[in-house]
C-alpha cells in the first residue's frame, strides 16, 4: 500500500554510477589512466547490477 515510501534501489545505483563517472572524468583529466580504468570498471559493474534489477 505504501510502496512509494520505499527507496528505489535502481535510482540509488544510478546515482552511485553517476558519481563514479564524474570522479573518473576528473581522474582522467589529471592524467592517472590506471585509476581511471579502475573507476570505469566499477561503473560497468554497477551498470550490470542495474540491468539485473530491471530484467
Image (cartoon, rainbow, N blue to C red):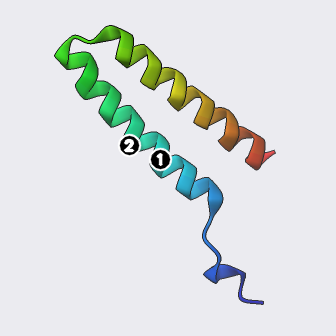
Q: Farthest bottom residue?
A: 1
5 horizontally vs 19: left or right: right
Residue beneath the point at 61% across and 30% down: 45
Residue 38 place in picture, x, y as percent: 46, 19
Residue beneath the point at 39% across and 33% down: 21
Q: CA distance from mark 2 to mark 1?
A: 5 Å
Q: What is the crowding at mark 1: few (fewer than 14 residues within 10 Å), some, or many (at least 20)?
A: few
54 horizontally vs 18: left or right: right
Q: Quadrant of residue 24?
A: top left
Q: Farthest left residue?
A: 30
Q: From what the image shows, is residue 8 above or below residue 1?
A: above
Q: Which residue is mark 2?
A: 19
Proximity of marks 2 and 1: CB atoms separated by less than 8 Å: yes
Q: From what the image shows, is residue 33 above or below residue 50?
A: above
5 horizontally vs 40: left or right: right
Residue beneath the point at 65% across and 80% down: 4
Q: Secondary structure at mark 2?
A: helix
Q: Quadrant of residue 30?
A: top left
What is the total number of numbered labels drawn onto the structure image?
2
The quadrant in which the N terminus is found is bottom right
Instruction: Out of 11 and 27, give the one closest to the viewer.
Output: 27
Residue 40 place in picture, x, y as percent: 46, 22
Residue 2 place in picture, x, y as percent: 71, 88
Residue beneath the point at 62% across and 82% down: 5
Q: Secondary structure at mark 1?
A: helix
The quadrant in which the C terminus is found is top right
Q: Which residue is mark 1?
A: 16
54 horizontally vs 17: left or right: right
Residue 41 place in picture, x, y as percent: 53, 21
Q: From what the image shows, is residue 47 above or below residue 6?
A: above
Q: Which mark is residue 7?
A: none
Instruction: Out of 33 and 52, give the one closest to the viewer.
Output: 33
Amino acid at each position: 500500500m505504501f510502496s512509494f515510501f520505499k527507496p528505489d534501489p535502481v535510482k540509488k545505483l544510478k546515482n552511485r554510477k553517476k558519481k563514479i563517472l564524474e570522479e573518473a572524468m576528473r581522474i582522467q583529466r589529471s592524467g592517472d589512466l590506471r585509476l581511471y580504468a579502475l573507476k570505469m570498471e566499477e561503473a560497468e559493474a554497477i551498470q550490470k547490477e542495474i540491468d539485473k534489477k530491471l530484467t
